[in-house]
Amino acid sequence: MKASLAPFSFSCCCFITFFSTVLSPTTGKPLQSGSAWRVFAVPGDDVTLPCRSNTPDHPSPVTAVEWLRVDGPSPLTVHVERDGKELVKEKAAEYLGRTAVMDVGSLKLLGITQQDSGTYRCLLLRGAATEDAILVSLFVGEVPEVHMSLLRTSANEMFVQWESSGWMQEPTISVLDANKKELNAHTESSLGSDDRFSVRAQVDAATAKETEKIMCRVEIPETSFRKEKQISIIDEFNPPEADLWYVVYIVIGVVLLLVVVSAVVFVVAPVDAIKKRQLLLHLIDFCTGKDYGSVSTVDTQQLFINVYGDIMKVTTTGASKPLLVNGQPLIGVQASHEVAKEDLEALKRHKEKLVTVGNNLGIHPAVIAGLISRQSRFGAELKLNGYGNGGDNCFGLMQISKYYHAVKGDPYSEEHLDQGVTFLIQLIKTMERRKPSWTKEQQLKGAIACYIAGEEKVLSSTYETLDSVTPRGDFANDVVARAQWFAENVFKSV
């Protein structure tokens, strides 16, 4: 399958903005503590361990450098160099091909792993004199996640709260607006029984009313060990804590008002069924302050935000490829549903992330699930490096093309899902601009086709023929059918 050269076209998927990102240390900038140096890094990075004492620069040149790992039962030789040549005879096997001496004896360690965490000792030889040993502690660990929640008080005040725990060194936490201007936020830090730090920040959303997005940044000072998470302000959070009788009175009033208006809308007003439903949902909006008008399934446990259309209303013919089940061939919607059913157990491992990303960005998580099911079968069709079995071009669950975008994050991570969904939203907005006569549901299906075939091919098609330019001629229909099965069988409640 060849990618089109038209803007934003691709053979697997692509993306333009990445909301949640990890900035990993590449230089291993240390924090000095007493006579030892501390360096923080994450797996996969290249890191530099410094070999610098607090004594003034020595006039004699360095003639030998010795690096040992000294936190085990016996020292391991990491790198020994004399007169510019490495001596590899005694070098520990796990460090072969992974080390190089930099300026003034500093050690560059390539492709670090969790097993590289430990204490290292550097010795420098200048002429006949050996300097004092320099100790460096290397901490290798994943950057902790930043979790976000939206809260509303009984006084109807909205707060955005971030929490992150598991930091090896005490981090700082700050809240920024869309222009990277720091907002006035309440922050706190604590040390747990596991000797790991936790931080929390809370900001009144009213202070950010001039911006559509808020970013939380957690970082270790003087390093690039950082985690950022950016969200859109969506008015979907915990209901206010109110007096019970006040709530009862409100509910009774809403019910009576709905009965009266429903009678008028359904009996008197000459409006079609869709418009009647919209009128009722807007009435609920007015009475409750919630945006149910964009929600397809009103559930007591979970409300999924469908800003860009109701997936259950999208027309679909399902998969074109026959599927043999118990000796009987299935085709169309039945075939798509059967494949979705086969992916159910794999989906459950990612369900929470799909719900979080979907509600943050206004896309029903079933749509995301349908795309992932078709693109990678929830990881079953990925290699160990996160790329598709068809080649090292498309990355992760949502198969993002490295030829069009810098792939970021873990192939199974929430950051990766943010990537793919945000690009899908961009495609929906393109369809809204270029196909204004289409319904929201038609625009959603058109964007799903664009996701695999590119904008220009789909925009030149009619709604009825938009799948003719996609792989197997059924990508959008198959994704929609799978998504509808997931919506009915997985995401009705959380």
Image: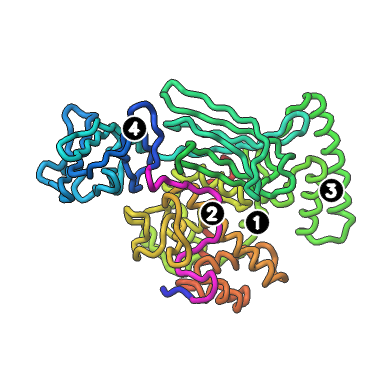
Q: Disc 4 designates what residue? A: 54
Q: Residue at x 34, y 61 (%)?
A: 389
Q: Is residue 93 left or right of residue 36?
A: left
Q: Is residue 175 left or right of residue 125?
A: right
Q: Disc 2 designates what residue? A: 18
Q: Disc 1 designates what residue? A: 310
What type is the residue that disc 2 sits on?
A: Phe
Residue sitting farthest toward the left: 89
- Is disc 1 surrounded by few (<14), some (14 to 19) or many (20+) residues within 10 Å? many
Compared with 294, 30 (above or below) is above
Q: Disc 3 designates what residue? A: 262
**Foreground: 473 or 274?**
473
Q: Are marks 3 and 1 in contact (CB under 8 Å)?
A: no
Secondary structure beneath dot 3 equals helix
Residue 116 in view of the camera:
yes
The kind of secondary structure the magenta stretch mainly shows is: loop
Mark 2 or 3: the one toward you: 2
Can you give x and y, in whole percent of width and height, for residue 233 in the image? 67, 45
Q: Are marks 1 and 4 in contact (CB under 8 Å)?
A: no
Q: Residue at x 51, y 71 (%)?
A: 9
Mark 2 or 1: the one toward you: 2
| Total labels drawn | 4
Distance Cα–Cα, label 2 vs label 4: 42 Å
User: Which of disc 4 and disc 1 is earlier in sequence?
Assistant: 4
From the image, which quarter does the N terminus lie in?
A: bottom left
What type is the residue that disc 4 sits on?
A: Asn
What type is the residue that disc 1 sits on?
A: Asp
Q: Residue at x 49, y 61 (%)?
A: 334
User: What is the quadrant of residue 91 in the picture?
Assistant: top left
The span shown in magenta is: 5-28
Secondary structure beneath dot 2 equals loop
